[in-house]
Image (tube, coloured by chain):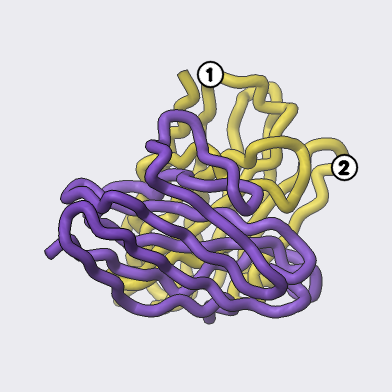
Amino acid sequence: EVLLLESGGGLVQPGGSLRLSCAASGFTFSDYVMNWVRQAPGKGLEWVSTISVRDFSTHYADSVKGRFTISRDNSKYTVYLQMNSLRAEDSAIYFCAKSGSLQLWRDFDYWGQGTLVTVSS
Amino acid sequence: QSVLTQPPSASGTPGQRVTISCSGSSSNIGSSVVHWYQQLPGTAPKLLIYSNNQRSSGVPARFSGSKSGTSASLAISGLQSEDEADYYCAAWDDSLNGHVFGTGTKVTVL
């Protein structure tokens, strides 16, 4: 059974930092692209970032480029999202999602339950 | 900011057919495949349809997807009360070099 468990969310002041983790199990982690997607309260889904399999290439939404960094540790079956210079508009539930293959354009076939990030003074 | 446009709401009575549209451009739907997700209230999204028209494992046959040019559609035939949820389309965008989601459609079963 594929499981994705996010952690690291919480309350942080504007300008602060948080590091989210997503622990994966139930599949060969190193064979799949991994992603982060967020959803602000009462709003729609917004793609945040993607990390590839072979060259660990990274992709970011314009709204987080230069502030967020995605990384993965295949030995620990974990993907991370380092979030710096946080703003109020970054407040959202952050979902970790597994892609359907090693291709960047594939669907997100499994999702975690999400971790809540609140940016407020 | 969503790049793919969906109607904010759709509704039908049990047993009816409901269709949700998703409009994009040549850099996303026009050059890539479309995926559809269902999000029940208070839960994580779930993959419904991938690669335009392929049902994900366990998804009932009443859900179907199609794509033509820069638009895509999700159809729910034989609408059931448990289909009441938010639905999102998504695709890879070559210009943005990332994924884009639709604005989302809330389906209500009357």
Residue B18, percent from left and from top: 33, 63
Residue A55, numbered circle? 2
The answer to whether marks 2 and 1 sit on the same chain is: yes
Mark 2 or mark 1: name the one nearer the start of the chain.
Answer: 1
Q: Quadrant of residue A92?
A: bottom left
The residue shown at (48%, 56%) is A18
At label 1, which amino acid type do we have?
Gly
Identify the residue at horizontal 52%, vertical 65% (top origin).
B73
* Label annotation for residue A26: 1
> What colour denotes chain B?
purple
Q: Chain of mark 2?
A: A
Q: CA distance from mark 2 to mark 1?
A: 23 Å
The quarter of the image holding the C terminus of chain B is: bottom left
Where residue A40 appears, x then y in whole percent? Answer: 36, 69
Q: Using the image, determine if residue B33 lies above or below residue B93.
A: above
Instruction: Confirm or deny contact between disc 2 and disc 1 (CB under 8 A).
Output: no
Secondary structure state at the residue bearing disc 1: loop
Chain coloured yellow: A
Residue B41 x, y percent position in the rendering? 22, 54
